[in-house]
Amino acid sequence: MARIAILVAEGARNEEIEFLKQTLEDADHEVRFMNTDTPFCRLGPEEFCGLILPHGRWPDGTSLDNDMKRFLRLSHLAGRPIAAFSGGVRMLLASGIGKGCTLTSPKSMRGLVEGSGARWVASPVAAFGHILSAQGPESMQELMEVFLSAVEAFQRLTPTEYLLETPPPEGGAI
């Protein structure tokens, strides 16, 4: 069993959040919901085996809380699987994690993704090492299958083994 954080933004769709929660609980994982009011300064990446950034209206990079950015960056540096879809991709970009990655998102965000230094692919789901992204809610099932596999690998392997086993795939698209 792993503890997974779901960062819920304003405007997140209840049915999507419920799907994520149920999928994680069905896989025997503990779910912790967090939002912009969470005291991220008290959290470290070791508290979670993975993060999910679902759809919602996230603040832009200039108004994103510095403690939240720090938490996301430290989780990334610790190799935690991070899955984002739709508006959650904006959170990756705002925290600086997406730079140099291959990501997918709604087509309307392609310019934002590329302007943030990431490579955009027109694929339902993309993986770049432990950074996973999906175009939108219609790709959630596929994204969660890849995410659950990444969490299992993260738990099974040492951090070094995990990072060596999960190199960016050719092209980034799944």
Image: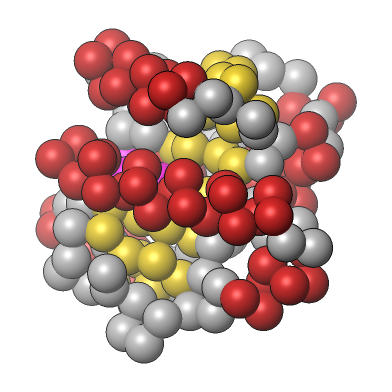
In this rendering, is residue 83 above or below 20?
below
The percent position of residue 139, horizontal first and vertical second, equals 19, 46
- For the question of whether residue 74 can be seen, the reply is yes
* 33 relative position to 143: left or right: right
* 18 relative position to 131: left or right: left
For image coordinates 78% across by 63% down, the residue present is 159
**Looking at the figure, which quarter contains the N terminus?**
top right
Part of the protein shown in magenta: 83-87
The percent position of residue 22, horizontal first and vertical second, equals 38, 18
The picture quadrant where one finds residue 117 is bottom left
Answer whether residue 141 is magenta in the image.
no
Q: Nearer the viewer, residue 27 or 113?
A: 27
How many discs mark residues in the rendered view? 0
For image coordinates 58% across by 49% down, the residue present is 152
The picture quadrant where one finds residue 5 is top right
Q: Hey, which residue is sitting farthest bottom in the picture?
A: 170
For image coordinates 40% across by 66% down, the residue present is 127
* 17 relative position to 71: left or right: left
- For the question of whether residue 62 can be seen, the reply is no
Q: Nearer the viewer, residue 146 or 111?
A: 146
**Looking at the figure, which quarter contains the C terminus?**
bottom left
Q: Main secondary structure of the magenta part?
A: strand
For image coordinates 65% across by 33% down, the residue present is 2
* 98 relative position to 90: left or right: right
Q: Nearer the viewer, residue 71 or 83?
A: 83
The percent position of residue 52, horizontal first and vertical second, equals 48, 38
In this rendering, is residue 172 above or below 5?
below
The percent position of residue 44, horizontal first and vertical second, equals 82, 37
In this rendering, is residue 105 above or below 167?
above
Q: How is the image coloured?
A: secondary structure
